[in-house]
Image (tube, rainbow, N blue to C red):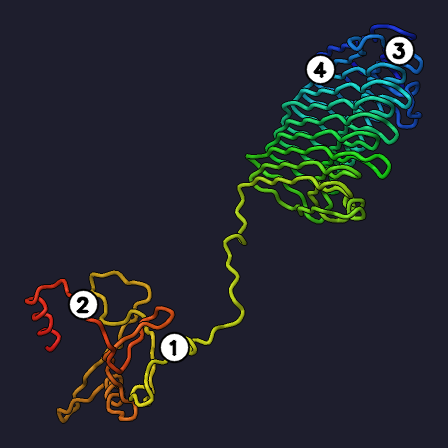
Amino acid sequence: MSLSNGAQINSSLIGKAKQVGIISIQAKDSVSLQGNATLGDTDVNQTGIFTEIPSGSELLSSDGKGNITINADQVIISDRARLSADTYGKGDAGDITVNAQQIELKNQGRIISVVREKADGNSGNITLNGRTLSITDEARISVSNRGTGNAGNVTINDFDSVSLERKGRISSSVRSGATGKGGDINVNTNFLTADGGTIEVENQGQGDGGNIAIETQNLLLRRQSKISATAGSTNNPGNGGNITINAKNGFVVAVPSEDNDIIANAFGGQGGKIDITANRILGFQNRQKLSLEQLRSLTNNGISDISASSDVGQNGEVSLNTLSIDPAQGLVQLPTNLVDTSSLIAQRCGSNSNVAKGKNEFVITGRGGLPPSPDDTLKAGAILPEWVVNSTDSNGNTSVSMPERNLKQLSSNATDTLVEAVGMVRSANGDIVFTAQPTTTTGLQSGLSSQVCSVVQGNVKQ
């Protein structure tokens, strides 16, 4: 079925009645609504399918709404064409349901349910079921209240992909001067992409904002895309709505410098709550406790933000649940002032001590010692000793290699006298310090027999 150049299907209530006519379309292949961008944006001129309660008319039963249902393989709405259920008088606008494998809105094509100015009633709900949804070039899916009443809900069920590009929009709003509660938006898709697109619940009138719930595998935001649940204004305070994004098996990603925002801010009321679950959340800055000026410039500050703030009320709550590990969490800040290790040496030697008068050194060389067995594996930190080779000249004299000669020279140096440690004490910080002077000790009863002690003493003397 194809409608174009101002063609319409219209069901309208006249006067007072209990029922607005219902429109139901069953198409085997496709439904196409193609408007004309050169015509004025009025019901008379635009292509579309409409149910409405005109100004001055009244719906006497809430069960008699003018609902619209479309079943097709493909639905395309373009060039200002509309699929709409509105009320200009008194009574609730109808619900819109579209079941199609492919749904495409482009060039200001719209699916809308609106309570118009001075009307009294609730806007309807919009429900889409399918595989792919594309909203591009200022096209939109919208439920809104411009009079008195609550905005409806938008539900997008079980799609493989949802794409909003070049100012494509999904929204539920209460406009300035209206009275009522904002509706909710629920999106369930494997992949959600917003490239200059917006998902928004907003209350600029008197009342609280609605909520946004997104269930997806991956969420990508590009080029000033927004997910927003805000409420209130300077003259009409309101509480921000809640945003829940569940991508627990995937990622929530934004380009940091492209001014993509996830916000639940409030003016004159309490900030909303943002709860995001994902493997990783990349590209956003979590910004809280913003001033009024910062709140007003948040959507155009050149930074990708996550914020649930209020200008005068209580700030909202941001909960980011990820499986990522922040490398900075395992880092320890090292001191910048190096410690003089010489001041840590305990001075236990007396003034008459030979050790104190001589030149003393304490050198840590590592594990060293005998080389490992050919059967052993090499171990980190082991220092192999240098080879010492004795060579015999033609006269039969044995010459000593350089390492051995150096050792003999060092041992014959009278100025560097080494004194054997004969005692030890424990310093104030618990370190054991060897001393050249004997220390007074308290004898303890050994658990060894006298025979074992004599053997040990004999070995020590040897």
Left or right: where does residue 356 sit relative to residue 1? left
CB atoms of marks 4 and 1 within 8 Å: no
Circle 3 is placed at which residue position? Answer: 58
> Helix or strand or loop: what does disc 4 sit on?
loop
Q: Residues within 10 Å of mark 3 (few under 14, many from 20)?
A: many
**Which amino acid type is shown beneath numbered disc 4?**
Ala
Give percent across and percent down for residue 6. Answer: 89, 18
Earlier sequence position, callout 1 versus callout 2: 1
**Residue type at mark 1?**
Ile
Of the image marks 1 and 3, the number of the one nearer the N terminus: 3
C-alpha separation, residue under disc 4 versus residue under disc 3? 32 Å
Against 21, residue 399 (above or below) is below
Q: Which residue corresponds to mark 1?
A: 345
Foreground label between 4 and 1: 1
Q: CA distance from mark 1 to mark 2?
A: 29 Å
**Number of marks drawn:** 4
Q: Residue 444 got which mark?
A: 2
The image's mark for residue 72 is 4
Q: Measured from the top left, where is residue 278 in percent x and y?
A: 58, 38
Name the mark nearer the viewer: 2 or 4. 2
Front one among 95 and 461: 461
Mark carried by residue 79:
none
